Amino acid sequence: MLSAFTARPIVELKQRDKSKIESILAYGDRVLVGLNTGALRIYRVNDQIEDPELEQKQNGDHNGDQPEPPTPKAKAADLLREEEKFSRRPIQQLAIIKEANILVSLSDNYVSIHDIQTYALQEKLEKTRGATTFAAASNIVKDPSTGIPSIVSRLAVAVKRKIILWTWQDMEVTGDAVEISLIASVKSLTWATGTKIVAGMDPGFVMVNIETQEVQDIVKPGALGEAGVQGSARFGAVSSSGMGYMGMGSWVPKPLATRLGEGEMLLAKDVNSLFIDTDGNALERRQVPWHAAPETIAYSYPYMLALNPPSKGSLDIRNPDTLSLLQSISLPNVNFLHVPQPNISLAHAGKGFLVASDRCIWRMGAQSYETQIDELVANGRYDEALSLLNMLEDTLLLDKEERVREIRMLKAHALFDQKKYQEAMELFTDARAPPERVIALYPRSIAGNLAPEESVKGDGSVVDEEETIERKDSDGKDAAPGAVSTIGRSMMGRLVGHKKVDSDTASIRASSIKDDAAETSSIKKRTTDPPASDKAIQEKDFINSVRGLQQFLAQCRVQIKRYIDTDGNLKEPLPTPSGSQLEAEKPPFHTLIHESAHPTDGGSDIDWKAQLLSVAQLVDTALFRAYMIASPSLAGSLFRLPNFCEPDVVQEKLYETGRYADLIDFLHGKGLHRQALELLEKFGKNEADEEVAPALQGPQRTVGYLQQLPPEMIDLILEFAEWPLRVDEQLGMEVFVADSENAETLPRDRVLDFLQGIDLKLAVRYLEHVIEELNDLNPEFHQRLVDLFLERLKKGEGEFDEGEREEWRERLQTFLRTSANYNKSRVFQQLPANDPDYYEARAVVLSKMGQHKQALAIYVFQLKDYQKAEE
């Protein structure tokens, strides 16, 4: 049960005083008490401030100091005066109209007006003879013509079948009394708005508009089409089709009504209840689960109050939203409930209401809202805590938004403990929970280092909590909790059912509490290890939990992408202090970062970019692990796109599971090209210990990988291009001569030197490709090709047959004819003068040099080829 309110007696009639309390009224620090003798007593309530330090000194502290003598406490209330002749009969009801400086009383079936200062009788309202109750209200009203606001106070008196109304504007009575006739005697009056009042009668409730004098029945939901006696659909009606009270000794319960929050009211008759709006329309809400008919109902912000009959002597406090019973306070013979209404005195809104018996008045002191919420959370009543927060104004709490978020995360955690993984993850997502907090709920196979250290032994088995406690005791001290230690037990512990201590937050309570046992009940965890037959169920639960985590982390990735690009740079600058701000506001992504990363000293020295990058890595790595456990086929879709996965984790897992192609894709995506190429070489040369797919064998994948690398990675390209060239030079050359931008933009001099170091023929092929297909006019390359042709022809003597040698001579001569960018003089000197194999080449070069006579001489006298000479 919640301990929201504490009853403190402020007025107790002395034993020799034979009077009885008939009515009470509170305003400011005054309490007016109407007695059955007709006397009126005026008390001043003394606020008592709780001082924990003083209380500790008086009770003695833990250091063995002697307690100090108690300081005399002030009386709870002082009797200021007593008007013994206020009335000749019991004072049944009291009210104040502060703006008109008058006190209103009901006594001897008359309503009277008194001076608020002297309590002297000003006027006995003769029209109210036979009055049974009244209701007063004050509201601020703007003049429709001038727009000037004024305070309009109204007094409605129930006299048999009539409502008689008086109106004050500021301090003056305006107009004559207005009478409105109803169908039956009025038993209760409750203001709905400044111009509408709810009248309770035996035949039911009606809404009365005092300006138009229109009377509207308040109808039960779904009763508009009912046939039968006229008015039988009216809520609270006494008829054969109604609640049938007339057969119970002619007893008819009193109709009760109270204003609740903004625009809502509660009507009650016996144990039946109806929620309506201020226009009298029924709301679709369930009935209040009262065990017995309440004596009185009221509303003290933000709670709904119900006073049980004096025989029960208790006050019930309920949440008007969930209708749950939050607190039941036992008070002997209590029969009065008085809440100073905000529309009369704003100072009393939601605090200091009074309850009374014939002999005693208690003032209800409320704990701070923060304390009440803490207590609900400690008892695992998260829905109640959230409902209370939703009803409270933002200004009444230190940080309402953050408090709501925290409790929603606690509720999600409790749902997770109940294995309601889908609901838990949806709530974690809605609450914008830090990913670290959610991931830490899982074992090391997903959470990595975030998993609680005590959850798994070195051999992978679960550590029993008793072992953990013994270990702590043997160390002589408890280990300090980690940043996420408050998150709870690991998923491994939940699934194998190892022994745990019951937690107050282990379950989500139902919003409707049936009895005290249900208030404190929680779902107990199994305390014995499950049999082997349960392992399949445990595994299924674990997989379900992991799939829920996948959805949560996928949403986190979407959020992270809003603030950070694939290179790890923030898309928008961080907020900076402006004006009078001492420190900058938190960035919009601060909710993604766990509280442990926030500075505890209130400083602003947090590296938000680094923290967000850390979260991005944590999310992607955990998502990868989750995919590998529950949905392996989805893992590729994660790491083939830009991601922040922790490389070591992914490499190890993919290698363990033999997903080598995926591993290569991941390394490529992360820019870890050396590691990828080393693996491809290992697989391509069939040097791996494991069996690899045929697609990874041979140089094909290495060549394809190298072709994707940009020109600035030329060192890496050349390092890993050698082995494919030596295995399959035709395929290996595709790295350098393929029809692609990367190949065309490689530094050609580096490639040429590299290829020449392997095989002169490869260098020649590359130069022919560069010059003939890429139209490179660099004279150095043209000269280099001639040099290589000559080197090949001179070195190749004896290495190849005459046909191949002739082919190389033809290629040299063709190039000498078609190119104009080599050094002709140098080439002419390089060509042997007396070797017949080079006569024609010399003639071509001489022709290029413009020495046509000498060229003709070679064709005619040395080659004796007259046709070419003529050409």
Image (cartoon, helix red, strand yellow):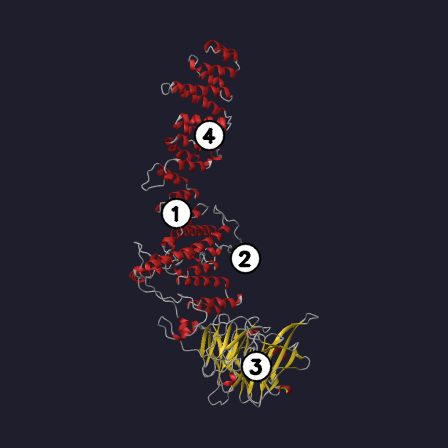
Alpha carbon distance from label 2 to label 4: 59 Å
- Judged by depth in the image, the label closer to the viewer, 3 or 2, is 3
Let me know if residue 308 appears in the view. yes
Q: Which circle's residue, 2 or 1, is located before the other in the chain? A: 2
In this view, which residue lies farthest toward the top?
A: 861
Provide the residue designation for mark 2.
581
Q: Mark 4 and 3 residues: CB-CB less than 8 Å, in contact?
A: no
Q: Is residue 498 depicted above or below 116 in this figure?
A: above
Crowd tier of the residue under label 2, counting other residues whose Cα lies within 10 Å: few below 14, some 14–19, many 20 or above: few
- N-terminal of the two: label 1 or label 4? 1
Q: Amino acid at mark 2?
A: Gln
Label 4 is placed on what type of residue? Arg
Q: Disc number at residue 748? A: 4
The residue labelled by disc 3 is: 203
The residue that appears at 42% across and 44% down in the rendered structure is 666
For marks 4 and 3, the one nearer the N-term is 3
Image coordinates for residue 280, horizontal then vertical, percent: 59, 74
Looking at the image, do the residues carrying marks 2 and 4 touch, with CB atoms under 8 Å apart? no
**Where does label 1 land, which residue?**
650
Helix, strand, or loop for circle 4? helix
x, y percent for residue 700: 40, 36
Instruction: Give x and y (percent) for residue 182.
Output: 62, 82
